[in-house]
Image (spheres, grey):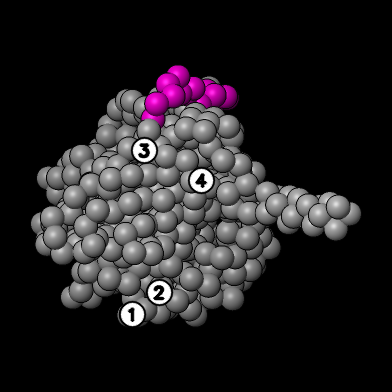
Amino acid sequence: MKRFLALLAACATILGLTALFGPQAVAATGCKVDYTVTSQWAGGFQAGVKVTNLGAPVNGWTLAITMPDPGQKVVQGWNATWSQSGSTVTAVGIDWNRTLATGAAADVGMVGSFTGANPKPTAFTLNGVACTGSVDGTPSPDPGDDDGTPVGINGQVHVCGVHLCNQYDRPIQLRGMSTHGIQWFSQCYNDASVDALAKDWKADLLRVAMYVQEDGYETDPAGFTNRVNSIVDMAEARGLYALIDFHTLTPGDPNFNLDRAKTFFASVAARNAGKKNVIYEIANEPNGVSWTAIKSYAEQVIPVIRAADPDAVVVVGTRGWSSLGVSDGSNESEIVNNPVNATNIMYAFHFYAASHKDSYRSTVSRAAAQLPLFVTEFGTVSATGGGALDRASTTAWLDLLDQLKIGYANWTYSDAPESSAAFQPGTCDGSDYSSSGVLTESGTLLKGRISTPDNFPTS
Ligand code: IDC
């Protein structure tokens, strides 16, 4: 009897430990799954899977998906750790989505291959419990501190499928402006100018372009880190997202600045981890360098950011000045076939409307079905940052980005003496950033586009 009790106690201990540390600690009592094939091509498909927990809160979950056709294989996935055994595909929640309150949902997704007809899955379980969606009354997320600003409405953003999604798991497009190099134009970023961006332009986003070379970060790491942080704070105070741009340009290989990037991002990510408005852009425009070298850089910098700020979105620059490789004679397939091994990331695409036209637009249209894209920089003029504004091409680009819900930041919110700047030279010496007289032709066009209503989804 004593021996039996001891055995029982040992079992209880093991069970207890499993309950504490096992990924399936708390079983859900109900769940609902929305499975959507978002695109399909010869032998391949992409699917979004939204799993809603209708049972007790879980801290750690495993979603098992039964694929009916033996030819269906998961190739890659996002927002979860994916694996497959026979006909069962498994997605395990990761650091930032592993906790699901009652009624909360996780949006995950996968790219798969198939050889037969690609039928939809026949069954789903969450922590071993069948998802029938039979319990209703899903509570909507707490509106929390919605103050009507972009960050107030959307909260912490994350990548869902090929989109950027808000706290309600709905795709959103963030529209805004990029600073010029803050080593040259710091006088343009002050309370009055950021007020104008938030209130008059009704922008969602300010990109903070911190050059690394050209008298930038490398000359004063602590000083530039502080300047970036203070602009992040100015954006946060007005409910704007801040895109922290590690503005590598020359040399084009981001690995040249790998150690600087690790130091910089460890610092800004730790300092800004608690904020909901920060997105990290780890390399502005890689050029003269292969995609594999860029991917290697990304896979070393992203873990540094995640260690400090696990839930932030990270944007990765692409080959050929962030042209998805097009300006180097390549295209998005090198990324699709060999993506960065990380979740919650997007890929940067840049264009200058007078230089980059239909062939670039068709690449973006095609790539947008397979890769989460963010236009972290673009100009209305030529790639030099000067020359005539190309209204027709800019309009075609912005219509396309609106239609695809791809976020963008325009180069530049500055009074630089070049046609890409939004303000007339000398504007930043004064305090008027609002009247129409201070705008350039490019600034007038962009303010007109950006200030139209966002209509962000709130449920
Ligand atoms: C340009 C600036 C210009 C500056 C030059 C070199 O407009 O004043 O002298 O950089 O630093 C990019 C780059 C961006 C460029 C911009 C226009 O990301 O730094 O800014 N551009 O040439 N990619 C394509 C164009």
Ranked by sequence position, the earlier of labels 1 and 4 is: 4
- Please report the residue visible at 27 percent of the width from the left and 71 percent of the height from the top: 337
Residue type, mark 2 in image: Ile
Marks 2,1: beta carbons within 8 A: yes
Q: CA distance from mark 2 to mark 3?
A: 36 Å
- Please report the residue visible at 63 percent of the width from the left and 54 percent of the height from the top: 22
The range drawn in magenta is 133-145
For residue 290, which numbered disc appears in the image? 1
- Please report the residue visible at 58 percent of the width from the left and 60 percent of the height from the top: 305
Q: In the picture shown, does residue 317 fall above or below 365?
A: below
Q: CA distance from mark 3 to mark 1?
A: 39 Å
Residue type, mark 4 in image: Asn
Residue for badge 2: 294
Residue for badge 4: 127
Ranked by sequence position, the earlier of labels 3 and 1 is: 3
Under circle 1, the secondary element is loop
Q: CA distance from mark 1 to mark 4?
A: 42 Å
210 on left or right of 13 = left
Ranked by sequence position, the earlier of labels 4 and 3 is: 3
Q: In the picture shown, does residue 377 fall above or below 324?
A: above
Give the x, y percent position of residue 403: 20, 39
Of residues 430 and 297, the one drawn nearer to the viewer in this rendering: 297
In this rendering, the label closer to the viewer, 4 or 3: 4
Residue for badge 3: 33
Q: Is mark 2 within 8 Å of ligand 1?
A: no
